[in-house]
Image: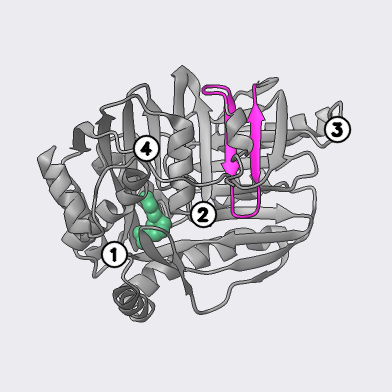
Amino acid sequence: MTMPRTDLLDAYRPGRSFLYSTAERALLATGATVTLPGRGPHAARRAAAVLDALGDDAHGRRSLLVGAIPFDDDAPARLVIPESHTWGEPVTGSPPHRTGVRELRAEPPEDDYLASVHTALSLMDGGDLDKAVLARSLVLRPNAPVDVPALVRGLAGGDPRGHTFAVPLPGRRTLVGASPELLVRRRGGVVTAHPLAGSRPRTGDPVRDAVATAELLACDKDRREHAFVVDAIATALAPYCASVDAPPTPTVTTTGAMLHLGTLITAELRDERVSALELACALHPTPAVCGTPTAPARELIGRVEGFERGFYAGMVGWTDGSGDGEWAVAIRCAEVDGDRLRLYAGAGIVPGSQPRAELAETSAKFRTLLGALGVETGTEAADVARIHRVA
Ligand SMILES: C=C(O[C@H]1C=CC=C(C(=O)O)[C@@H]1O)C(=O)O
């Protein structure tokens, strides 16, 4: 007998619900008693004060704050204290419905992306920059209106170990994604971060993926790209922590579409008044989404990318009144606006990066969303490039 499937997503209300599901558990928060005004770090400080003032809710549970912070510190955050929230089992994944696509367009065009990678490499030649993460977007219109809960199930099915989220944004837009990257988690005095950088497409063929994994671990370019992120996170955590442990050698994290170098960083918090959200803001933007040094990388991104990142490459998560919480890097995501989606993907550029390989890497990263939307991509980045041309 087949048991009926019930999980938190069944109570999801479009435009009102925030969902955050990991391999461990899922959070569904609905409505907003307070919407915190303000931008990144300021909103985080105000949030800590508001949570403190609210104390426990009517059921004796810690108050909770949920939402998303955009990439750009000057753009408004979306942080709310919900009317209600529930914890439950992780969202059950299911295969996507194939609806077909009536429009699929790279924005900016792929040649512009190649040109921006060349620009980054010449800045690196001149010694002004060590790493930059350059992104591009795809505008997609499926044949049928986007069903956010179905998309979330598709994402959870493709990446059961990811951080799957749906965040309501102003203007009835929704940020939907499945991020493999933990920006920071705080549980009592224990802080955990799991930065990712350095990638290969995953084919699904065990032999080819084993070869790609070995290549990734041995690749000097990818190891350098990764080390910038680990160093930056360990340095940013140090002032808040009595100890920070960052193993010297990365391991490989596997998603449905990709293989990534990853390092599990653990730290011991010095002062438990520092919340998960404050830690997340202290880490953001890491060189996994921006670059090294931060200021010239950020300047380059604003100058050459040719689109607004919005919440892409920002963060999504929750923090409770005790300061515990979890924030994922907002990657492998799309913004849904009615019957239109904008998908985002970026790649870390360091000296030695090949522009065409970086373009192919971003194409492969789009497969997380394209797969969950039921857009046929095959397993190769080249197939994705072909779809772009058909569009
Ligand atoms: C910026 C993205 O991925 C980051 C996370 C993992 C690997 C990355 C890389 O290898 O470039 C990126 O730093 C993205 O997916 O849009």
Render colour scheme: one colour
Q: Is residue 45 left or right of residue 172?
A: right
Mark 3, other Cα within 10 Å: few <14 / some 14–19 / many ≥20: some
Residue 148 on image: x %, y %: 45, 31
Q: Is residue 57 visible?
A: yes
Residue sitting at x 73%, y 36%: 48
In the picture, the disc for residue 160 is 2
Mark 1, other Cα within 10 Å: few <14 / some 14–19 / many ≥20: few
Q: Counting residues from the N terminus, which is met first, the one under dot 1 or under dot 3?
A: 3
Q: Counting residues from the N terminus, which is met first, the one under dot 4 or under dot 2?
A: 2
Q: Which residue is mark 3?
A: 56
Q: Nearer the viewer, mark 1 or mark 3?
A: 3
Q: Is residue 147 above or below residue 152?
A: above
In the picture, the disc for residue 127 is 1
Which residue range is magenta in the image? Answer: 13-31
Which amino acid type corresponds to the residue marked 2 in the rendered image? Pro
Which amino acid type corresponds to the residue marked 4 in the rendered image? Arg
| Tag 1–tag 4 contact (CB < 8 Å) | no
Q: Is residue 91 left or right of residue 156?
A: right
